[in-house]
Image: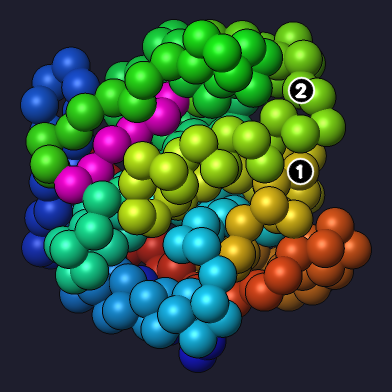
Amino acid sequence: MRAETASSSNRQADWWNPNAGTLSVELSAAPYRRLALQLRHELAAAQQPHSILLAHPSRSTLPPRAAVLLAYCVAEELGQTVLLVDACGSSSELSRLLGCEHVSGYSNALSNPDTAPQPQRTSHPGVHFMPCGSLPSAAAGRSEDAVPRFMSSALATHDVVLVYGGSVLHDTVALSVAPHVSFVLLLPVENETLVADLDAAQKALRFCQARQIGVVMLTAGRSAG
């Protein structure tokens, strides 16, 4: 996949907030719509289930916002149901962004798959959200088959599963998910991510048997509102 820039602009896109209805963020949707179409072709060519890990080399506040907008654009452009999963742990920026940091979710599902919580509905009928969960990462009690079992269940009810794994170099979540998805999309941020960190993140993902890795450079603009 060719790298593509997702740039900020003055145009506002509505993001879902389960408590407040929507959260306006100054990001242009156009690059994410193009990326959604590219991902469809990549997955179709590989004849793999539509599961994608979204991660970034180092800590940044822009990738979580990009993940939400990409989920929306995938649902819009492909006309498919999307499950956006926050796999980052109980302190994840994505779940905080959407007001769900204390809601049962991914960590609870890994700990007890028989009583896994249902995903949260969003303002878009085609997009659901699985929060990070109410258990600390260390207490999730992951068995060896916990992640693949979760992915299989998610794909049984949704056409596309986007898993937000956070920073590859600061958390083990992305590395634990990488072997169980069809595609890994790294989201470095222009003028923030070091080249050495990007290289290190790709090497770590390959070592953990990621099947395919793509890179999309995010461009930070005006701050989100």
Seen at 51% across and 57% down, the residue is 51
Residue 81 vs residue 102, the one in the foreground: 81
Q: In x, y percent, where is residue 4?
A: 43, 83
Q: Nearer the viewer, residue 156 or 217?
A: 156
Identify the amino acid type marked 1: Ser
Circle 2 residue: 142
Q: Is residue 158 visible?
A: yes
Q: Which residues are magenta?
A: 126-131
Question: Would residue 128 be counted in the magenta stretch?
Answer: yes
Where residue 196 sits, quadrant-wise, is: bottom right
Of labels 2 and 1, the one closer to you = 2
Majority secondary structure of the magenta segment? strand
Residue 76 percent coordinates (x, y): 16, 62
Identify the secondary structure beneath mark 2.
loop
Residue 197's place in the image compared with 111, above or below, is below
**Label 2 with label 1: CB-CB less than 8 Å:** yes
Give me the disc on residue 176.
1
- Badge 1 local density, few (<14 within 10 Å), some, or many (20+)? some
- The residue drawn where x is 36% and y is 41% is 157
Between 189 and 110, the one nearer to me in the picture = 110
User: Does dot 1 land on a helix, a strand or a loop?
Assistant: helix
Q: The disc labelled 2 sits on which kind of residue? A: Arg
User: Mark 2, residues whose alpha carbon is within 10 Å: few (<14), some, or many (≥20)?
Assistant: some
Q: Residue at x 21, y 28 (%)?
A: 121
